[in-house]
Each structure stands twice: as structure tokens, then as C-alpha cells.
Image (spheres, helix red, strand yellow):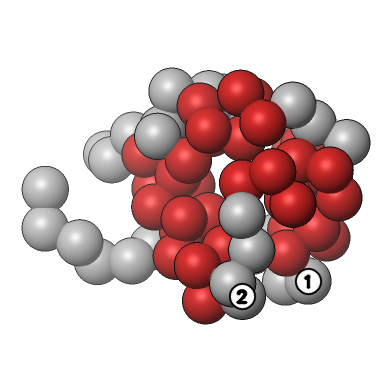
Amino acid sequence: MEDMRKLVGRNFARLRAERGLTQEAVAERANRSQQYISGLESGKRDPTVQTLFQIAQALGVSHMELVKPDHQDH
């Protein structure tokens, strides 16, 4: 099974870019550090369910969008 951290990171990066948001803007909205957001996007962080909800809210999407399979080849 795919590493969920990498999947969340890819989905987060895509959603953030689609909305024209910087990592800093999302960090501020989600009450997280830019370093945390960077680690999340690079697949190095293992976010809690609460953090997924906060990040999704900061992006204006459902938390399900962050864990949705993207069918990228491994």
C-alpha cells in the first residue's frame, strides 16, 4: 500500500497550487508553521486527523480531498 504521507503531500501540493496559495498562507490559515506545511507537502509529516481537517479547511476543501487516491504510478 502506498505511503499515505506521500499521497497527502501530493494532494496538498496540487490543491494549494490550484488555489494560488503559498505554503505560508496555508500555514497561517491552519495555525501551523511554514516548516510543518513544507514537511507535510514533501511527505515527511504524518498528520493527525485533526490536522487534516485544519489543512483542508485552510484550503477550502473537504478533508477527503487530501486522502483521495490520485492514481499516480509508483
**Residue type of the residue flagged with mark 2:** Arg
Q: Residue at x 33, y 66 (%)?
A: 70
Q: Residue at x 61, y 46 (%)?
A: 23
To which quarter of the image does residue 9 belong? top left
Judging by the rendered image, the residue that carries numbered circle 1 is 60
**Residue type of the residue flagged with mark 1:** Gly
Mark 2 in CB contact with mark 1 (< 8 angstroms): yes
Pick whichever, 14 or 72, lies toward us.
Answer: 14
| Camera-nearest label, 2 or 1 | 2
Instruction: Indicate the position of residue 14 as horizontal and vertical percent values.
Output: 44, 65
Residue 72 to residue 61: above or below: above
- Any part of residue 50 in sight: no
Screen quadrant of the N terminus: top left
Q: Residue at x 74, y 26 (%)?
A: 33
Label 1 environment density (alpha carbons within 10 Å; few <14, some 14–19, many ≥20): few
Judging by the rendered image, the residue that carries numbered circle 2 is 19
Label 2 environment density (alpha carbons within 10 Å; few <14, some 14–19, many ≥20): few
To which quarter of the image does residue 16 belong? bottom right
Instruction: Indicate the position of residue 51 as horizontal and vertical percent values.
Output: 77, 37
Left or right of residue 30: residue 37: left
Element assignment for label 2: loop
**First of labels 2, 1 by sequence position:** 2
Pick whichever, 48 or 37, lies toward us.
Answer: 37
Element assignment for label 1: loop
Q: Residue at x 83, y 60 (%)?
A: 57
Instruction: Indicate the position of residue 63 as horizontal and vertical percent values.
Output: 71, 60
Q: As drawn, which residue projects farthest toward the bottom?
A: 18
Residue 32 to residue 74: above or below: above
Left or right of residue 2: residue 36: right
Marks 2/1: CA distance?
9 Å
